[in-house]
Image (tube, helix red, strand yellow):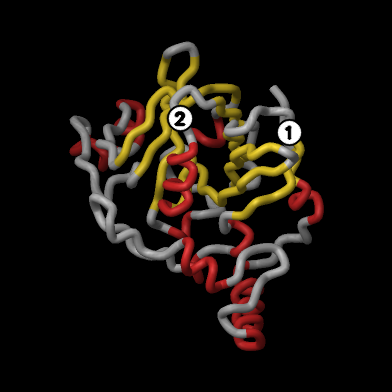
């Protein structure tokens, strides 16, 4: 298994506190306006377009509140050294990123949240199944841990409140489901954080982008946290 290398991470400055980020962002917007372009990401105008509402979905998806997302977690094309074939998905739970290898030393990078399973499971897998607006059925282990999930033992219908969201990619090994998923979320405040349950979540707008480019049998590498 090869581990890719994100050159942006090598050059990243020390992390700022959330308060410092908010104060700095406010100052930047005040000085340069909403169309100002960050040196490390997309312009605010572009972000509002990419993360805008999705009214034509089965369950209309609201726009992302960009103010709740650290700009470093917004989708972008980055230099990423990897020998993996185009289309390979690499999950980096330590840095809260998911990469799609694009070839020629580049990858599309998505910000993610990571749940318990995302910190304890690593290895190679493949996309064994895909689903749009899936039914969520909590595993017995989760119900034992979180009794509030018991009412959904037979499945929660799809919808905006469903934990798997609009799209889900299911990871398999040797024909067996690993219980590990990459799913979509409408909760921007969770991106770049550990969440109480689940595996790895992307903003719905990012997940639709990844989902549409990812066929069944796509290789997935989950790095150690």
Residue at (47, 67) in percent of width and height: 49
- What is the secondary structure assignment of the residue under circle 2? loop
Earlier sequence position, callout 2 versus callout 1: 1
Q: Tell me the quadrant of the picture where the N terminus can be found.
A: top right
Q: Which is more foreground, mark 2 or mark 1?
A: 2
Q: Is residue 222 above or below residue 110?
A: above
From the viewer's side, name the closer residue of 203 and 148: 203
> Mark 1 sits on what residue?
82
Marking on residue 215: 2
> Residue 6: image x %, image y %?
73, 45
Residue at (53, 48) in percent of width and height: 112
**Image side of residue 202 versus residue 168, left or right:** right
> Residue 79: image x %, image y %?
74, 47
From the viewer's side, name the closer residue of 225 and 59: 59
Q: How many marks?
A: 2
Marking on residue 60: none
Residue farthest to the front, as pictured: 104
- What is the secondary structure assignment of the residue under circle 1? loop
Location of residue 82 (image quadrant): top right
> Residue 106: image x %, image y %?
70, 43
> Residue 38: image x %, image y %?
67, 70
**Image side of residue 92 versus residue 137, left or right:** right
Residue at (61, 46) in percent of width and height: 108
């Amino acid at each position: 298994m090869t581990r890719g290398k994100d050159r942006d991470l090598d050059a990243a400055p020390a992390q700022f506190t959330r308060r410092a980020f908010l104060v700095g962002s406010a100052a930047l917007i005040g000085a340069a306006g909403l169309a100002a372009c960050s040196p490390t990401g997309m312009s605010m105008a572009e972000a509002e377009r990419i993360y805008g509402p999705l009214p034509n979905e089965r369950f209309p998806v609201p726009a992302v509140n960009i103010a709740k997302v650290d700009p470093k977690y917004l989708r972008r094309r980055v230099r990423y050294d990897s020998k993996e074939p185009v289309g390979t998905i690499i999950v980096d739970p330590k840095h809260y990123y998911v990469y799609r290898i694009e070839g020629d030393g580049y990858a599309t990078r998505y910000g993610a949240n990571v749940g318990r399973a995302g910190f304890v499971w690593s290895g190679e897998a493949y996309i064994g199944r895909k689903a749009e607006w899936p039914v969520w059925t909590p595993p017995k282990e989760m119900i034992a841990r979180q009794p509030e999930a018991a009412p959904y033992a037979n499945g929660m219908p799809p919808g905006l409140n469903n934990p798997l969201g609009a799209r889900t990619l299911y990871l398999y090994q040797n024909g067996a489901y690993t219980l590990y998923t990459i799913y979509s979320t409408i909760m921007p405040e969770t991106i770049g954080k550990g969440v109480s349950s689940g595996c790895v979540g992307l903003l719905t707008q990012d997940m639709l982008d990844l989902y549409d480019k990812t066929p069944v049998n796509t290789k997935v590498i989950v790095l150690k946290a």
